[in-house]
Image: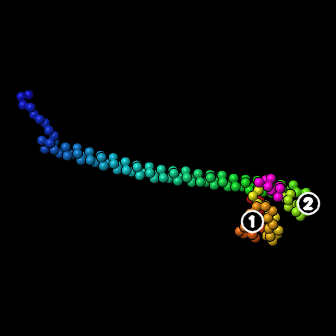
Amino acid sequence: MDKEQDFRLEDSPKGKSSFRLLVIGFCVVVLISVSIFLFLMNRMTDRSKAATLDIANFYIERMNVQITNHFQAVIEVKLSQVESIVRTMPPDGELQGEELREAMRASGMARKFRFLGLMDGEGNMEVLFGDNVTILDKEEFINSLSGGYRM
């Protein structure tokens, strides 16, 4: 080869169209790739949000069950403690007046109650110990006590 020829793609008319086709093809591939990436990213973000919501809802439901069960257990324990105070009092009025109140006070304090009181059927309350308690719906409270309802 006595003459070096520098072959460039752009020098020939066929080369220019091939180069242009190559650049356009590369741009199309890049656009398609970016579009697919953006679509998948959007899809993954939506699924991630949905999964987070599902987990949060499951957690809240389980916590609700746990709190409800705990509350019911605490109420059961407190009601059984009150029933045990009543059972430990001597039968048939052996204790009357202040002696009965003192025995109930001692029994309530032994069970670490913060409040103990006696209530009649009309809602009048005598506090044996602790701070006064305000009952928001006296009628419903009295009905639940007189009906023997338990939680």
**Residue 4 appears in which quarter of the rendering?**
top left
The kind of residue on which mark 1 rests is Asn
User: In the image, 151: left or right of 57?
Assistant: right
| Foreground of the two, 104 or 87 | 104
Picture colour scheme: rainbow
Is residue 50 inside the magenta stretch? no
Are dots 2 and 1 in contact, CB under 8 Å? no
Position of 119 with respect to 23 (left or right) is right
Tag of residue 132: 1
Q: Main secondary structure of the magenta part?
A: helix
Q: Position of residue 39 (x, y in %)?
A: 39, 51
Q: Quadrant of residue 136?
A: bottom right
Tell me if residue 107 comes above or below residue 127 in the rendering. Answer: above
Instruction: Look at 13% across and 36% down and name the residue there.
Output: 7
Q: Position of residue 21 (x, y in %)?
A: 21, 45
Q: Quadrant of the N terminus?
A: top left
Is 33 located above or below residue 101 in the figure?
above
For the record, the magenta segment spans 105-112
Task: Classify 10 Å Cα crowding around label 1: few (below 14), some (14-19), many (20 and above).
Answer: few
Q: Position of residue 99 (x, y in %)?
A: 89, 60
The image shows residue 68 at horizontal and vertical percentages of 67, 55
* Structural crowding at the residue carrying mark 2, measured as other residues with C-alpha within 10 Å and reported as few (<14), some (14–19) or many (≥20): some
Disc 1, SS: loop
Closer to the camera in the image, 112 or 72: 112
The residue depicted at 14 percent of the width and 42 percent of the height is: 10
Indicate whether 122 appears above or below 61: below
Q: Which residue is mark 2?
A: 95
Residue at 82% across / 64% down in the picture? 118
Q: Could one spot residue 86 in this view of the protein?
A: no
